[in-house]
Amino acid sequence: MTGYDEQLRMLSEQIARRNKLRAMLDSLYARRRELEARERELAAVRDAEQKDVNRLEGRSLAALFYSMLGSKDERLDKEQQEAYAAAVKHDSAVRELEAVRQDIDRYESELHTLRGCEQQYEQALADKRESLKQSGAAQTERILQLEQEIAAQQALEREIAEAIDAGRTARVTAENILSSLHSADNWGTFDLVGGGLVADLVKHSHLDSAQAQIEDLQIQLSRFCTELSDVSVETDMQAQIDGFLRFADYFFDGLLVDWMVLDRIRESQSQVQGTAGQIDGILYRLDDMQNDCRAAQQAAQEELDALVRDA
């Protein structure tokens, strides 16, 4: 039976991978639609904010009005901050959209190579069933059922492991962001008590680092959600991961429009800590699912061994 067993194992893995790819692609297609709409919306906001800056920098009536009030520089600073925040949010959405498109291309290409695997599996299974019957093996159907169950549990374990890897990657990035924000907080506090230009520059250097890492985290959280798309999860877990998809928007809304204020930095720390806690909760539950999966495999394998031994 070794030839049948190896062929069935390989085809079973291909079927499981095909099913996962389909589930992930469905999730990615939906995410692509959302991001395309979001990118268009943010592009319009970016253009509008830049026009406000240009209006105040040029010879407009608004510029004259604020000059007469003596508040043109203050107003221009505010408009420039808002334009910068809009540009960062748009750039982040563009980057995430490109990452989603690349994932779709890669998964569609892989899915194309798996065409016909289910039909090949059914034929190999039928051939093995007939061979077992001709050999007079007892409990033929139960043996085949247990082998299928073990293969399914092995596939699920791989899917869970891939989701865990994606979650851990995002968790490490979240920790790095917290480190950058903590450093910015410390230097910001020092700046308040007379740290001067050096303290201000170092603070903003850490904020720049946090900003870049947030964009990485947004993509990683999106991929974490995609990896979970073919893993059976409870409704409240799904609600948690759906919340990740707007994470960068929340972060940038708070920090970049008013990024020199310490309480904004601390609010951002709280947001990142909350997201890290959600990741930890999901990883904990995935670990439980992985342990249950391994226990089910072991029980099925022990029963199968006994049947084969007694056949």
Image (cartoon, grey):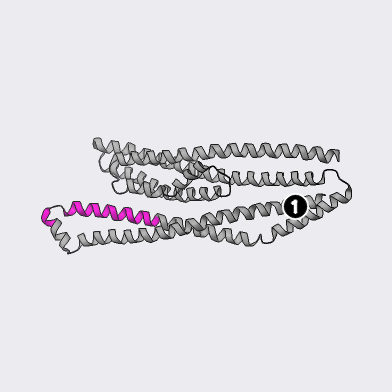
| Left or right: 289 in relation to 146 | left
Determine the image quadrant of residue 57: bottom left
Q: Residues within 10 Å of mark 1 (few under 14, many from 20)?
A: many
| Left or right of 71, for residue 310 | right
Residue at horizontal 19%, vertical 63%?
58
What quarter of the picture does the C terminus occupy? top right
- From this view, report whether residue 74 is shown above or below residue 33: above
Residue for point 44% across, 46% down:
243
The percent position of residue 297, horizontal first and vertical second, equals 70, 40
> Where are the magenta residues, as a range?
67-91
| Mark count | 1
At x 72%, y 53%, the residue is 10
Q: Nearer the viewer, residue 126 or 31?
A: 126
- Residue farthest to the bottom? 59
Residue 188 x, y percent position in the rendering: 30, 39
| Left or right for 157, reference 125 | left
Q: Which residue is mark 1?
A: 8
Instruction: Give how far across and how far down residue 273 sits, in percent.
Output: 42, 38
Which secondary structure lies at badge 1? helix
Q: Horizontally, is 87 left or right of 172 in the view?
A: left
